[in-house]
């Protein structure tokens, strides 16, 4: 593993926030073709809605603060651990840290751990995502 890659372990990324709005819930439902009324009316979140929080909240910009070449970056995986219910209207704040970083063959792997908190400070979700960078 390169020294610079190893130095990423423990790095905290910029915190970001996102207000869960009915329109974004509907957009995701329509995009994936799940047209249940509770999604279309923004009354309930789809299980993968945290991806919307991350994207529109700015979390996808992590590769910049990690010094990665965006043209060589792939999304390698995503896992969610639901702690509490996220409800429409919540403002979610996300804290991220590099949990691990290593090289395998000609690929760099960066594992990000994220914790999602609602506006009252309650932990509602944990996620782990893998960023893959081709060398």
Image: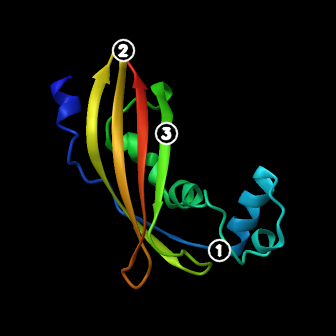
Name the residue beneath numbered marker 3.
77
Which element carries disc 3, helix, strand or loop?
A: strand
In the picture, measured across the screen, residue 61 lies left or right of residue 85, that is left
Coloured how?
A: rainbow
x, y percentage for residue 122?
38, 79
In the rendering, which numbered label is found on residue 81?
none
**Label 1 crowd (10 A; few <14 / some 14-19 / many >=20):** some
Name the residue beneath numbered marker 1.
21
Q: Residue at x 62, y 78 (%)?
A: 88
Q: CA distance from mark 1 to mark 2?
A: 41 Å
Quarter where residue 16 is shown: bottom left
Name the residue beneath numbered marker 2.
106
x, y percentage for residue 53?
54, 61
Q: Residue at x 46, y 32 (%)?
A: 70
Of pointers 3 and 1, the one earlier in the residue sequence: 1
x, y percentage for residue 90?
54, 79
Q: CA distance from mark 3 to mark 1?
A: 25 Å
Q: Nearer the viewer, residue 3 or 125?
A: 125
For residue 119, above or below residue 80 = below
In the picture, measured across the screen, residue 95 lies left or right of residue 74, that is left
Identify the image quadrant of the N terminus.
Answer: top left
Which element carries disc 1, helix, strand or loop?
A: loop
**Label 3 crowd (10 A; few <14 / some 14-19 / many >=20):** few
């Amino acid at each position: 593993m390169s020294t610079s890659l190893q130095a990423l372990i423990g790095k905290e990324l910029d915190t970001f926030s996102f207000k869960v709005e009915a329109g974004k819930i509907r957009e995701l439902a329509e995009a994936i073709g799940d047209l249940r009324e509770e999604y279309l009316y923004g009354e309930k979140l789809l299980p993968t809605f945290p991806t919307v929080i991350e994207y529109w909240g700015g979390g996808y910009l992590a590769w910049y603060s990690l010094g990665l070449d965006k043209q060589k970056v792939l999304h390698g995986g995503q896992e969610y651990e639901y702690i509490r219910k996220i409800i429409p209207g919540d403002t979610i704040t996300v804290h991220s840290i590099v949990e691990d970083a290593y090289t395998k063959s000609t690929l760099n792997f960066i594992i990000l751990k994220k914790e999602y908190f609602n506006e009252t400070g309650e932990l509602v979700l944990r996620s782990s995502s893998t960023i893959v960078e081709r060398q």
